[in-house]
Image: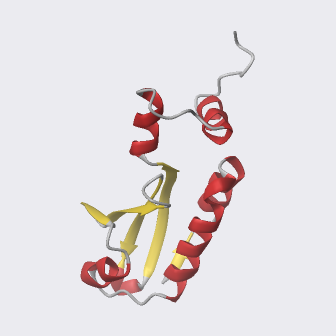
C-alpha cells in the first residue's frame, strides 16, 4: 500500500515516544501489504474496524493508541487521518484507574494550547 502521510505518525511519536515502535511496525507492515478489500485488511489486522466512508480505525499497542485512515483499495492508497490515544487509556485516566504519564500530560496541554503554567 502507498501511505500518505508518515508525518502524522512522526508528530504523534514526538509527543508519545512510547508508541513509536508499534506505529513504525504498523507502517512497515502496511507498506508491504496488498489489500484489495476489507476482508484482506481484517485478515492482517483483526482488531481493525470500518467506520464507513472508507475510514478504518486501527488499534495499535493493545488498544492504547488509535490510527484512523482512509483507504482506497483499488488505488492501493492509504491516507492517515488521525493518530491519537485510544479511548480505554483516556477513560482509565479520567476514572482514576490509571495515572497519566508525561506524554499524556504534554498532549493534553499542547492540543488546546493551554500554557502548562496557567495555575
For the question of whether residue 62 can be seen, the reply is: yes
- Depth check: give the residue in front, 90 or 1: 90
Is residue 38 rendered to the left or right of residue 7?
left
Residue in the image at 64% along x and 67% along y: 21
Is residue 53 rendered to the left or right of residue 111?
left
Q: Residue furthest top?
A: 119
- Depth check: give the residue in front, 64 or 41: 64
Q: Number of marks in the image?
A: 0
Q: Quadrant of residue 103?
A: top right
Q: Position of residue 32 (x, y in %)?
A: 52, 88
Q: Residue furthest front?
A: 97
Q: Is residue 71 above or below residue 103?
A: below
Q: Quadrant of residue 59?
A: bottom left
- Depth check: give the residue in front, 5 or 21: 21
Q: Position of residue 98 (x, y in %)?
A: 50, 35
Q: What's the coloring here?
A: secondary structure
Residue in the image at 63% along x and 33% along y: 105
Q: Residue furthest right?
A: 117
Residue in the image at 62% along x and 71% along y: 24
Residue in the image at 68% along x and 47% along y: 15
Q: Quadrant of residue 94?
A: top left
Q: Position of residue 54 (x, y in %)?
A: 30, 67
Q: Is residue 89 above or below residue 56?
A: above
- Depth check: give the residue in front, 65 or 96: 96
Q: Is residue 24 above or below residue 86?
A: below
Q: Position of residue 70 (x, y in %)?
A: 39, 66
- The C terminus, quarter of image: top right
Q: Is residue 51 above or below residue 95?
A: below
For the question of whether residue 52 can be seen, the reply is: no
Amino acid at each position: 500500500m502507498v501511505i500518505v502521510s508518515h508525518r502524522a505518525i512522526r508528530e504523534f511519536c514526538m509527543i508519545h515516544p512510547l508508541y513509536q515502535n508499534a506505529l513504525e511496525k504498523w507502517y512497515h507492515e502496511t507498506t508491504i501489504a496488498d489489500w484489495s478489500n476489507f476482508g484482506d485488511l481484517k485478515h492482517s489486522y483483526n482488531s481493525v474496524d470500518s467506520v464507513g466512508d472508507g475510514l478504518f480505525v486501527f488499534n495499535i499497542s493493545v488498544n492504547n493508541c488509535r490510527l484512523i485512515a482512509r483507504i482506497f483499495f483499488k488505488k492501493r492508497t492509504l491516507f492517515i487521518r488521525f493518530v491519537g490515544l485510544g479511548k480505554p487509556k483516556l477513560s482509565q485516566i479520567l476514572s482514576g484507574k490509571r495515572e497519566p504519564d508525561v506524554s499524556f500530560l504534554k498532549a493534553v496541554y499542547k492540543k488546546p494550547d493551554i500554557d502548562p503554567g496557567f495555575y
